[in-house]
């Protein structure tokens, strides 16, 4: 995950895509809209965007269909916006896991021995020992080459599906505390 202004705006569109989806509304009862605005001369923004006052990030709550007006909830810092992005992507990934995925007791395809107890966002799973070793050298999945982010992976896969639901609830309550 690069740290350019372009990447930041990319994260913002992923945030908006998810916070306006039915899935997010189902969990949170809210529709959110994140907006970034440059306060200074636009051509300098890609260079100086991290300096205080260069950009302003606002989060709005959008009303129901009958009255879809936006109301400003809060102004956000860059680091809180990045944190919200991580939490949302984790939520999205968690909700993509089904009880069947969780209960599949596959063996790790690297060592062919231990239980594949760590599932990556691409849904490939490996034993935690091998994937942590692998990640030190390569940051893409050994099977599909999509980026690995071990912070956004599930380790020690629980047998219970409740853990995934708790994970979603924890993400959501942190997001709610950041935007209120
Ligand atoms: Zn292994
Ligand atoms: Zn993969």
Image (cartoon, helix red, strand yellow):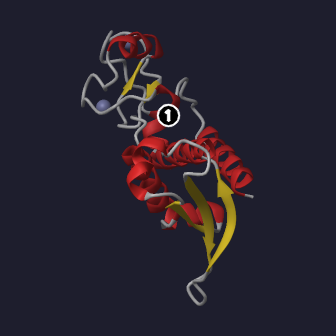
Quadrant of the displayed image that contains ligand 1: top left
**SS label for mark 1:** helix
Residue displayed at 58% across by 30% down:
158
Measured as percent of width and height from the top left, residue 157 is found at 53, 28
Question: Would residue 123 be found to the left or right of residue 170 on screen?
Answer: left
**Near-viewer residue (156 or 61):** 61
Q: In this view, does 58 lie above or below 109?
A: below
Residue displayed at 48% across by 65% down:
21
The answer to whether the residue bearing label 1 lies less than 8 angstroms from the nearest atom of ligand 2 is no
Measured as percent of width and height from the top left, residue 144 is found at 24, 31
Q: How many marks?
A: 1
Extreme bottom residue here? 66
Question: Would residue 166 be found to the left or right of residue 107 on screen?
Answer: right
Measured as percent of width and height from the top left, residue 143 is found at 25, 26
Q: In which quarter of the image is the N terminus?
A: top left
Question: Would residue 121 be found to the left or right of residue 78 on screen?
Answer: left
Q: Is residue 12 above or below residue 82?
A: below
Q: In which quarter of the image is residue 142?
A: top left
Measured as percent of width and height from the top left, residue 18 is found at 48, 59
Residue displayed at 61% across by 61% down:
58
Q: Quadrant of residue 111?
A: top left
Q: Is disc 1 surrounded by few (<14), some (14 to 19) or many (20+) residues within 10 Å?
A: some
Q: Is residue 94 above or below residue 65?
A: above
Query: Which residue, given by chain and number where applicable, does mark 1 sit on?
Result: 152
Q: Quadrant of the C terminus?
A: bottom right
């Amino acid at each position: 995950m690069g740290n350019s202004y372009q990447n930041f705006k990319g994260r913002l569109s992923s945030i908006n895509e998810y916070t306006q989806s039915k899935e997010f509304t189902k969990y949170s009862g809210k529709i959110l809209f994140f907006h970034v605005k440059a306060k200074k001369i636009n051509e300098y923004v890609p260079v100086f965007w991290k300096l205080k006052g260069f950009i302003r990030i606002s989060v709005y709550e959008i009303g129901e269909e009958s009255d879809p007006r936006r109301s400003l909830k809060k102004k956000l810092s860059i680091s809180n916006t990045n944190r919200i992005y991580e939490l949302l992507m984790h939520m999205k990934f968690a909700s993509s896991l089904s009880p069947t995925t969780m209960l599949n007791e596959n063996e790790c395809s690297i060592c062919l021995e231990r239980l594949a107890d760590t599932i990556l966002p691409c849904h490939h799973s490996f034993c935690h020992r091998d994937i942590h070793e692998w990640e030190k050298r390569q940051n893409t999945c050994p099977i599909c080459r999509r980026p690995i982010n071990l912070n956004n992976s599930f380790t020690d896969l629980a047998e219970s599906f409740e853990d995934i639901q708790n994970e979603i609830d924890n993400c959501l309550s942190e997001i709610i505390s950041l935007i209120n």
